[in-house]
Amino acid sequence: MSNTEMTIGMVGLGRMGANLSRRVMRAGISVVGTDRSAVLMSELADAGAEVAPTLSELVAKLPTPKTVWVMVPAGDPTALVVHELSELLSRGDCIIDGGNSYYRDDIERASILAQKGIDFIDVGTSGGVWGLDRGYSLMIGGPKSAVERLVPLWQALAPGINAAPRTNPKSPVGPAEEGWLHCGEHGAGHFVKMVHNGIEYALMAAYAEGLNILKNANAGSATADH
C-alpha cells in the first residue's frame, strides 16, 4: 500500500497526537482526527486533516481495513477509548495504542480484541514535541502481519536512514536504523519503552544531582595557600 492510499484515524489531538498527524500527512498519508476539544480539531483541520466529533463518525470515515491510532493518557482514558472502538470496528481492523500504557494491559486488551478479529498494536513513541520535524523512535509490539501491513506508517513517522551518520555504511539498511523496530508480540513495544523511560529518567536525575552538587560546592570561591 502506498502512502497516498493510506488513511488513519487519530484519537487525541494534543501535542503528540496532532504532531503525529501532521508528520504522516507530510508523507502523503491521510488523517481523520477527533478530540474532545473543538479548538484542537479545528487546528488540525486547518492543517489538512479531516475531523470527526465522535468516535463512531471517525470510524465511518475510514476505509477498510480501518486503522485507528489512540493517543490519549494511559490508564482509564485509553481503556475507555479502546473499548468503545472495539464495539465500532470489525474483523481485520487495527487499533494502535501509541501512549505509555502498561505492557500487561496491552496483552489483556489484545486478547480481548483478538476474539473479534481486531488487531492490536502497542507502540512506544519517543520524540516529544520535536518529533514533528526530527521524527519519532517507534518501539512496536504486535502480530507480524499487522505490523508489516503498516510499514508505510512507521516509515513516515520515523526519522529515516539519513537522520544520522550510519555506524556501518556497508551493512544492509534495516528498520532499526530508520528509527522503528518490531520488538515482539503484544506488550513488547511498551515494555521496551518502559525500559527506555527508566534509563532516560535515571540519567536525568543523575545529571540534576551532579549539577546540584556543583552549584552548592562553592567551587572557586576559596583559594589554597601555597
Image: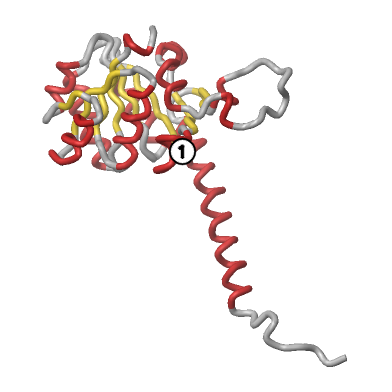
Q: Give the camera-side residue of 3 and 88.
A: 3
> Which quadrant holds the C terminus?
bottom right
Residue 163: x and y, percent?
Answer: 56, 30
Spot occupied by residue 132 in the image (x, y as percentages of width and height): 40, 35
Q: Please name the residue shown 17% across and 27% down the image.
A: 51
Quadrant containing the N terminus is top left
Q: Would you identify the image quadrant in which residue 62 lies?
A: top left
The residue at the far top in this view is 1
Please state if 24 lies on the left or on the right of 180 as rendered: left
Q: Is residue 166 left or right of residue 68?
A: right
Of 153 and 182, nearer the camera is 153
Q: Quadrant for residue 177, please give it.
A: top right
- Residue at 42 percent across and 16 percent down: it is 152
Residue shown at 13% from the left, 23% from the top: 56
Q: Which residue is mark 1?
A: 126
Compared with 87, 190 (above or below) is: below
Going by the numbered disc 1, the residue's amino acid type is Ser
Residue 209 percent across, percent down from the top left: 58, 67
Mark 1 falls on what kind of element? strand
Residue count near mark 1 (Cα–Cα under 10 Å), binned few <14, some 14–19, many ≥20: many
Which residue is pictured at 23% across the width and 11% down the height?
63
The image shows residue 25 at horizontal and vertical percentages of 33, 23
